[in-house]
Image: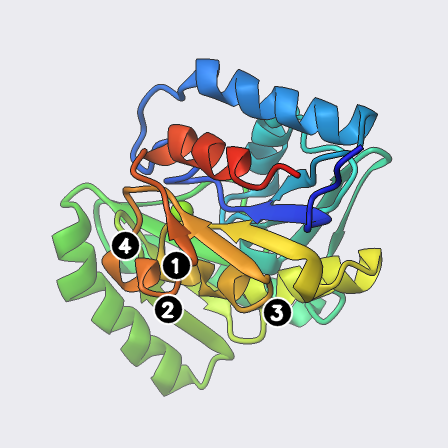
Amino acid sequence: MPHSKYDAIICDIDGCLSPEHPAPTDLCTIAKIAAWNRRAREAGDVPLLTLCTGRPQAFAEAVARMVGAFGLPIVCEGGVWLLEMDPYRWSMDPRITDGHRDLIREVERWSLAQFEGSRLEIGKAGAVTIFHERGAEYLESVVLPAVWTRISDKGWPLRASMTWTCVNIELEFISKASGIDRLLASTGLKTERLAGIGDTMSDMAIRERVAYFACPANADEKLRAHADFVSDKEEAEGVLDILERLKG
Ligand SMILES: [Mg+2]
């Protein structure tokens, strides 16, 4: 039986398996990706696909159920958690203390009080994600600079950055990179036997920890420059196209 050069594929969710902005997920293609993972579990001749996302655990779990990402830990909330579906358990990065979690709650309260019209992504335990009714431009020009100033003035161990749609405030020592490092440490998977898929610069954490990295067509130009392959198909169809090239 031919075996892949890779033992696992680490795949981002938003902009890869599901649309970046709220829109219906391409379930026909997701079903084919789920069939890939079934084959990986049952025949073992293709690598398992697991997930690495900035989204909260509950969202990651829902996607994991759809694509059958059972068998390897999932990095969620940008490295705050490792989630396993079988056995069903999850663990927070052990470096996050009660003090850090209190700080995150404080930042949540401050953000809501400071930015009228803001709302916070639900389900985050060790990070804060701010959306605003005035949109991404307002977030980038008004909210993000104010957050940076607050972090600097307070000396908080946090960093803040902009995505397409929101501001992320994260503990400075937690990231997709630290989450993947925990994934590798807990499984014994080796970088030289891994493939990865991502669409934005936060996925450089995946790029730097895999031997082969690919992007769907919608990926950020800056990230595409670091890819071994860029599909001409978008989002989930792009992921499926990349998987087909990882066979045997
Ligand atoms: Mg993404």
Q: Dot 3, crowdedness within 10 Å: few (<14), some or many (≥20)? A: some
Residue farthest along the front direction in this orientation = 1
Residue found at x 27% / y 47%: 165
241 relative to 52, above or below? above
Query: Mark 3 sits on what residue?
Result: 100
Residue nearest the observer in this picture, 194 or 65: 194
What separation in Å lies between label 2 and label 1 (alpha carbons)? 5 Å
Residue found at x 64% / y 42%: 50
Residue 228 in view = yes
Mark 2 lies within 8 Å of ligand 1 (Cβ measured): no
Contact between marks 1 and 3 (CB within 8 A): the answer is no
Is disc 1 placed on a helix, strand or loop?
strand
What separation in Å lies between label 4 and label 2 (alpha carbons)? 19 Å
Query: Mark 1 sits on what residue?
Result: 168
The mark that comes first in sequence, 2 or 3, is 3
Q: Quadrant of the C terminus?
A: top right
Is disc 3 placed on a helix, strand or loop?
helix
Amino acid type, mark 2: Ala
Query: Mark 2 sits on what residue?
Result: 160
Specify the label residue 220 is tagged with: 4
